[in-house]
Amino acid sequence: MPFIDFNLSLPSFDWRTFDCVIIGAGAVGILLAVKLTTNEKRVLLIESGHFALDDQRQVLNEVEQSGKPLSNPVWARKRAIGGTTTVWGGQSLPFSSMDFEPRDWVANSGWPITYAEIAQHYTAANEFMCIDRSNYDTDLFKRLKRPNPGFDGSRLHYHFSKWAPEPNFLRLYRRKLERNVVVLYNAHLVRIDLGESGRVSEILITNFTGRTAVLPVRTLVLATGGIETNRILLLTDHQVRGGLGSHSGWLGKAFMEHPCLEAGYVEPYNMRLLQQVFGTHVRRLRKYSVRLSTAQSWQRKERLLNASASILCRYQEDGKGNPLSWLKQVSRQPRLEPAVQILGNCGRVALSAWALAKDGFVYKPGSLATLVFMTEQEPTKCSYIALSDRTDRFGKRLARLNWNITDKTWHTIRRFADEIIFEMERLQLGRVVLHPHVRTDVINWKDRLSDVNHHMGGTRMSATRGEGVVNDQLQLWGVPNLYVCSTSVFPTGSHSNPTLTLLALGIRLTGKLMSDFGRGL
């Protein structure tokens, strides 16, 4: 089936024949479309962008900010077929079982589903990303021929994250989309209408030349990013005051990111050993990174948040001193500059190449080992998404973001740093030197934290109608044929990259939708 550019034309389909309309052709939108059409369902996938990024579409991401500012909410989010998969690295890491449990020391924690209900879909989600079936610790110790370095498991969990060999879902699934899915692009959603039964009856879309179209809907899935999903529902207030999903007072509330901090650096006792323990590993052209996260028993004892640390070995000039990057440049396109660098640094190139060939890890001689934290954010109503008074080119109000982080994040970072300092010394891996501002008495600690484009929360999943926006099946409370499959449904955010868990939710939702279709709903 063709990709259809709404800027050029709109074919005379019988739009009522589509079993499902999906808004958003990013990671999970593509997954849902591929999985449903594999099961012989007719799917219409609608995307406001097209095949490339440009100012005209990206400006629709503009956000008014009233709290701690995100670094770049316009360009960190991608309005294009493939979404952020067109630019991300493809990192895969599951949540832990405690992330789904109510914790009396973490406000508003607890999912209405168990870890087991998600974990059973992690393997299929990894397979969709073309990632191996190994677990994230013991299996990979064997696969990478690496021993467990001996961190105290009651304090710290040493494990890996995996990287997709082809992170761009458009490249990965373009043929299947062309063959089985109708992809309508340059088509921006501007309104969702409910019928008398309380079900979604139709949607209004517009292109970038001013043309509009009303399309009937049997089942609608919002598979848009965390901020945009909230905005869409908040804007749908012409029939429901406050927007669809506003019944509980939770719509837009508990926006989360993964607050990050470069906390200091490590003075290694043996730089090669440190990088072998914490560096990037490569096995059969697959890449694996190391994470050191807080043990669940430690979180309970300290009554703090989930968090992880990485030790990243960096050169002072954005990779210009990286021997392996010079080799990559020369292999892809012979050029004089990297060839000269190789010739002038034969020793470092040889050491890096030998480490990769012999022990399967990326070694960067002469680099600085920096300590970087990524933490869970406590979900509270004081961190939220609302609507601005300013409007976009289609006359729709912009999102207004008030990102707010509680003190528990800083307490977690500080105590976590103490544990890493102790364990690194005990294992004789190096001396951790924290930056002076990483202290409990720093007043402006929020200014030190950065975001990583992991936008979560605002349409939280809940066990009862009064506690959230969608139910445990991702169905909007009170609207039987409207589903939300976005990181916006996460009640808590762990420390892990959210995409794998979102894809697992998408696979779970596919089963629910197939059941609905089978019952004629």
Image (spheres, grey):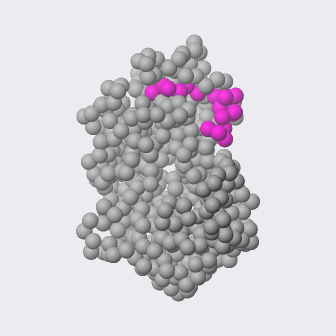
Residue 30 falls within the magenta-colored stretch:
no
Residue 331 versus residue 161: which sits nearer the camera? 331
Q: Residue at x 44, y 16 (%)?
A: 211
Residue 96 versus residue 422: which sits nearer the camera? 422
- Pinpoint residue 184: horizontal percent, then vertical percent: 55, 25
In this rendering, does residue 211 appear at all?
yes
Q: Residue at x 54, y 15 (%)?
A: 9
Please tell me in which quadrant of the rendered image residue 355 appears.
Answer: bottom right
Q: Which quarter of the rendering shows the C terminus?
A: top right
Q: Residue at x 30, y 42 (%)?
A: 64
Residue 294 versus residue 450: which sits nearer the camera? 450
Residue range in magenta is: 170-188
Indicate whether 443 appears above or below 84.
below
- Pinpoint residue 78: horizontal percent, then vertical percent: 48, 40
Please tell me in which quadrant of the rendered image residue 261 appears.
Answer: bottom left
- Pinpoint residue 456: horizontal percent, then vertical percent: 43, 50
Q: Residue at x 65, y 58 (%)?
A: 339
- Pinpoint residue 493: horizontal percent, then vertical percent: 45, 56
Q: Which quarter of the rendering shows the N terminus?
A: top right
Indicate whether 120 appears above or below 265.
above
